[in-house]
Amino acid sequence: MSQPTSVRRGLWSVFAVAVVGAAAAHFDVIGHVAYALERGRIKADQEHLTRISSQEVAALEGLSRAFNTVSAVVKPSVVNIQARIKSDEESDERVKRFFGEQHLPVPPSYSVGTGSGVVFDDQGYIITNNHVVGTAERVDVTLADGRQYKAKLIGADRMTDVAVVKIETTRLHPASFGDSDGVKVGDIVLAVGSPFRLDQTVSHGIISAKGRNVESLDIDYQDFLQTDAPINPGNSGGPLVNIHGEVIGINTAIATENGGYMGVGFSIPANKVRRIAEQLISGKKIERGFLGVSIGEVAAGTIEAMGLEYPQGAQIEEVQKDGPAGRAGISYGDIVLEVDGKPVGNSRGLTEAIGGVSPNTKVRMKIWRDGVTLEMDVIVGQQPEGFSTRPGRRLAPERSRDDDVSEESGESDEKVSVYRLRELGFSVTALTQELADGLRLKGVDSGAVVVRVEPMSDAWHAGLRRGDVIVQADKKSVRGIKELKGALTEQAVLKGVRMTVRTSEGSRSLVLRSN
């Protein structure tokens, strides 16, 4: 082969490489391969969708149609409520908490809050929340079809947060109410209302829990249904409905850290709402049952000593001697397990059960006392005016000074200002009139005042706090340090000593145990 021929072939090779390189520079081989694969996958998925069962798709379409139908049935019954409230610090805070900010032009001395409601009957009665309309100077209702009316407040019940207003019109669409007692955790529900003034908004979720109590709300009788259906400011007073289009709750509150939806909402059960609404419409005074006791939870640490298999029932902490429970023979330390055959899960369960009983009604209560089950008939009394079921959990403020009393450790007698129970981690002094006045105590003239509790001690773990006044220990009255020392023997605290403490806001019981 001649040299010129070899050179020509070399040049052609270089040219070919250059052409291929230039083509590659303008053509993303890897990208095109990935694109082809993606197209293939999408085409395969499309073919799969056409092959998959009509059953699977039909199930989704059926659920969608069910939501369509429920929405169409319920929405005509749901109204928007605008409440004009006199401006002051308290009402402004209420508006922010329940309604969100309001930007409508109103007179300077008023603010306007937005809530929801549900038509109860064809006479124009509408159910909503007390916190929506209870303090309003004027209430305006907008129906689903756009008609607007001024509403009259018929009645409101602060203890359940239920209220009824009335409009004068016809062609209404009352909602159908279901049985909230039959609701189960996991049931699908829809919430309808006016969140952030967006009328006729529908959201969906499930029932997350039943029998919820929210300590931060000033509502005595709660027993809420908990739902994850989105509820926001403005939903208050609107309905929570089941898949049959029946109202099973009235949306009332949310648990939130930012003022908006965070997945935890609370609704008043429909059976309670209907009962209260009917009384308000009839003009009757709402009467509730009364036992004349203070109650608390059964501490998990005491069930073994009490002979119970697990924490259950409501523990009696105080009994009015001349009250309904006292007359029936119920005493301090009893645990109420059932009312008329229905289990009492905790203290709120007993509160709800008795509150729903008409005064002068006889109920049968199953009691656990010293390892023995008893049954007692109690004639339920009438709840007195100004009664509240919500004693504070932290029952007294800390005093600003420690040095107003001297402290000694070890054995002591009544002459020493403060006695320190070193092993249990707290110190007490005898209650004086001056201390009682400073702690705003009423009806308590003796006891042992807790002046210090060591962090992480047995006393702290049991729930004892500074400012608590110990009035009973091991079912015996504590008049001062001497009686308390007698009850807190080494042997007793190993098993656990039940104590009753008082503060300005009520009483509670706890079990002090040495671990």
Image (cartoon, rainbow, N blue to C red):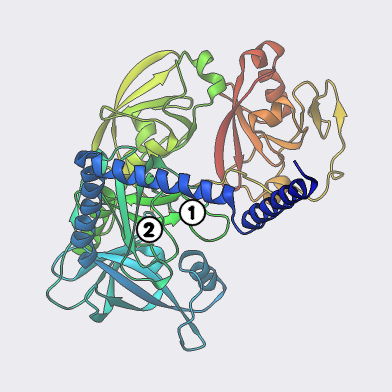
Q: Where is residue 244 in the image (x, y as percent from the top left)?
A: 19, 49
Q: In this view, does 325 lie to the left or right of 181?
A: right
Residue 257: give its label: none
Q: Position of residue 209 (x, y in %)?
A: 39, 40
Q: Callout 1: few (<14), some (14-19), or many (20+) C-alpha neighbours within 10 Å?
A: few
Residue at position x 24%, y 79% from top?
146
Sequence-first disc among 2 and 1:
2
Q: Is residue 338 left or right of residue 501?
A: left
Q: Callout 2: few (<14), some (14-19), or many (20+) C-alpha neighbours within 10 Å?
A: many
Residue at position x 74%, y 48% from top?
5
Residue type, numbered disc 2: Asp
Q: Do the residues labelled 2 and 1 touch (CB within 8 Å)?
A: yes
Q: In which quarter of the image is the C terminus?
A: top right
Q: Position of residue 420 (x, y in %)?
A: 80, 28
Q: Indicate the secondary structure of the residue bearing disc 2.
A: loop
Q: Indicate the secondary structure of the residue bearing disc 1.
A: loop
Residue nearest the observer in this picture, 22 or 331: 22
Residue at position x 46%, y 68% from top?
99
Residue at position x 28%, y 56% from top?
286
On the image, numbered disc 1 is attached to which residue? 217
On the image, numbered disc 2 is attached to which residue? 161
Q: In which quarter of the image is the N terminus?
A: top right
Residue type, numbered disc 1: Leu
**CA–CA distance between discs 2 and 1?**
10 Å
